[in-house]
Amino acid sequence: MGVLMVIFGVFVMVLCMCTAVLRWNEMRYRKKGLPPGTMGWPVFGETTEFLKQGPNFMKNQRARYGSFFKSHILGCPTVVSMDPELNRYILMNEAKGLVPGYPQSMLDILGKCNIAAVHGSTHKQMRGALLALISPTMIRQQLLPKIDEFMRAFLSNWDNQVINIQDRTKEMAFLSSLKQIASAESSSVAQQFMPEFFKLVLGTLSLPIDLPGTNYRRGFQARQNILKILGQLIEKRRDSEESHKDMLGYLMRNDDNNRHKLSDDEIIDQIITILYSGYETVSTTSMMAVKYLHDHPTVLEELRKEHMGIRERKRADEPIEWNDLKSMRFTRAVIFETSRLATIVNGVLRKTTKDMELNGYVIPKGWRIYVYTREINYDPFLYPDPLAFNPWRWMDKGLESQNYFLIFGGGTRQCPGKELGIAEISTFLHYFVTRYRWEEVGGEKLMKFPRVEAPNGLHIRVSSY
């Protein structure tokens, strides 16, 4: 009996201490003028609930506090905005003190020179260098031939196999980007680079706690290994003085035609940014397109019809060209609808550079603002029957240009690689649907937050078409 009383007493004491800590943490952030909301535990905040519950956490908080509330996620005090009009204002007003505010883990792992982290004149310089790499002219003349050559080889010999399409699209997105960045060396460095890159990606959405075994530690160590790989690659190219017509070659140019000269550190962070930003979007959209096309035979039939029409105009070995890409109207619609329904991107982060008033509340300097755009994708006023996979809705170009189209970001931070990503996914789908038919094996579970993924893989049985 005495032992039970001691256990009960310890339990009550721990409960009281936890309650006191939670109350103390709430009191710290109960400043006049802040939006309503909860802050959770010191340091950890509500990160666990946010990552595990995802959309349900957001819906519950909105039901309690409205569409503008405070929280503490990914190591930062954060205000969440779920109001479409306010979100648009936030994204369009970087000059008024709303700069990129990505979590510390992302800044540490992607590098302080990456385009998502910088602002003002530095952002203009970095964005100019990036846009020069992925302009329509560069895609048409330099990148699309590389993408076509890679996809043609990558999608060969899949016949009569059971494959994990999640793993294959991850490899595809990484290796395709690496070939565009460093054509000559892509094969030799891929085996060493790829596992480090995958660890880096996992670390970007984690608490910045530098302890052994954490995703943050593994991601940061992977960054250090990638810096060595890329540093050696740059040094080797300088020693050889050979001209290279790829992204790295362009970034390293010292002639007067290069208006956006970068330091080696900036070049490396730019390369990591290109790999990171394209990887997640291209791999996940490609995987989910395969999934949705399998589940909607009518859509697959229409898509295949478009691509068979292109193949009929070509010789068997003739590559996809710019005009072919521009003619893939239904393919573009499938990509947009996949991105919308799967919600590949849930939102973007901004940071206040000064105390500022938003929506009637005062947001302190240094706080993050999470522009949560997920719910817009399911708004029945914008997308009738929003849970249906209906690419035909995008055949009207007006939908792509409307104010709330935030699938590829918004404001001055709209994804500069949008058209390059579409080119990669379109070319992948072209060779996949014209060569193969497929069926799912096992009906594996899909998770849609914080990343869209199949924890046990997404297996399909492939046969020739």
Image (cartoon, rainbow, N blue to C red):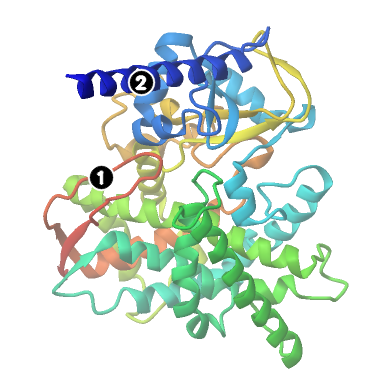
Quarter of the rendering occupied by the N terminus: top left
Residue 270's quadrant in the figure?
bottom right
Residue 439 horizontal/vertical position (percent): 13, 58
Q: Amino acid at mark 1?
A: Leu
Classify mark 2: helix, strand or loop. loop
- Residue 38 appearing in the image: no
- How far apart marks 2 and 1 lie (CA) works out to 24 Å
The one nearer the camera, 184 or 306, is: 184
State which tag comes first along the sequence, 2 or 1. Answer: 2
Quarter of the rendering occupied by the C terminus: bottom left
The one nearer the camera, 206 or 92, is: 206
Residue 249 horizontal/vertical position (percent): 69, 77
Q: Residue at x 64, y 30 (%)?
A: 91
- Residue 455 appearing in the image: yes
Considering only vertical position in the picture, is 344 above or below 368?
A: below
The one nearer the camera, 367 or 90, is: 367
The one nearer the camera, 425 or 99, is: 99
Q: Which mark is residue 446?
A: 1
Residue 3's quadrant in the figure?
top left
Classify mark 1: helix, strand or loop. loop
Q: Residue at x 35, y 30 (%)?
A: 53
Dot 1, crowdedness within 10 Å: few (<14), some or many (≥20)?
Answer: some
Considering only vertical position in the picture, is 401 above or below 294?
A: above
* Residue to which mark 2 is pinned: 380
